Amino acid sequence: MSPRKMKGMLKSMGIDIEELEGVKEVVIRMPDKEIVIENASVAVMDAHGVRSYQISGDASERPISGIAQEEPVPEIPDSDVELVVAQTGARPQEAKAALQEARGDLAAAIMKLGGK
């Protein structure tokens, strides 16, 4: 079957396929390594609002060198600290520490301190 007929048949089933142009490489990061796909060809399929990516190319693996890099802790606004204090009854220092540990995620910080 020709690619044109295949695309038409998929479209009639509600599946759109689009080729991404200009992709040089795709990197898949895992805790201990990266999979690098060079000369990548990427097709995006949209089936009823669900997007899937099909990738092909020259794959290689490389270990992640050095110490795992952590993201910097975000700046915690005073209003967030006050909200956590109001919701949990914790002291401001505890609320700020919980927010920093949760990387600014209010819900996670409140859940952490919820038992107080």
Image: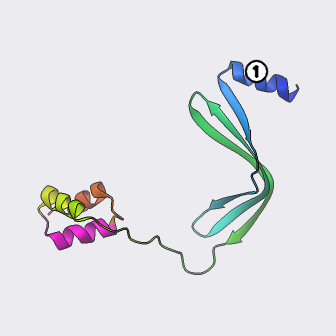
Count of labels shown?
1
Residue 96 covered by magenta stretch: yes
Q: In which quadrant is the N terminus drawn?
A: top right
Residue at numbered disc 1: 9
**Residue drawn at 71 percent across, 23 percent down:** 11
- Badge 1 marks a residue whose secondary structure is helix
Is residue 70 visible in the rendered image? The answer is: yes
Towards the viewer: 57 or 33: 57
Picture coordinates of residue 34, whole percent (x, y): 66, 65
Picture coordinates of residue 109, whole percent (x, y): 27, 61
Query: What's the magenta region?
Result: 90-101
Q: Main secondary structure of the magenta part?
A: helix
**Which residue is the extreme one toward the right?**
2
**Which residue is the extreme one toward the top?**
12
Work out whether 43 lies above or below 71.
Answer: above
The image quadrant of residue 37 is bottom right
**Which residue is the extreme one toward the bottom?**
66
**Residue drawn at 56 percent across, 31 percent down:** 49
Picture coordinates of residue 63, whole percent (x, y): 67, 73
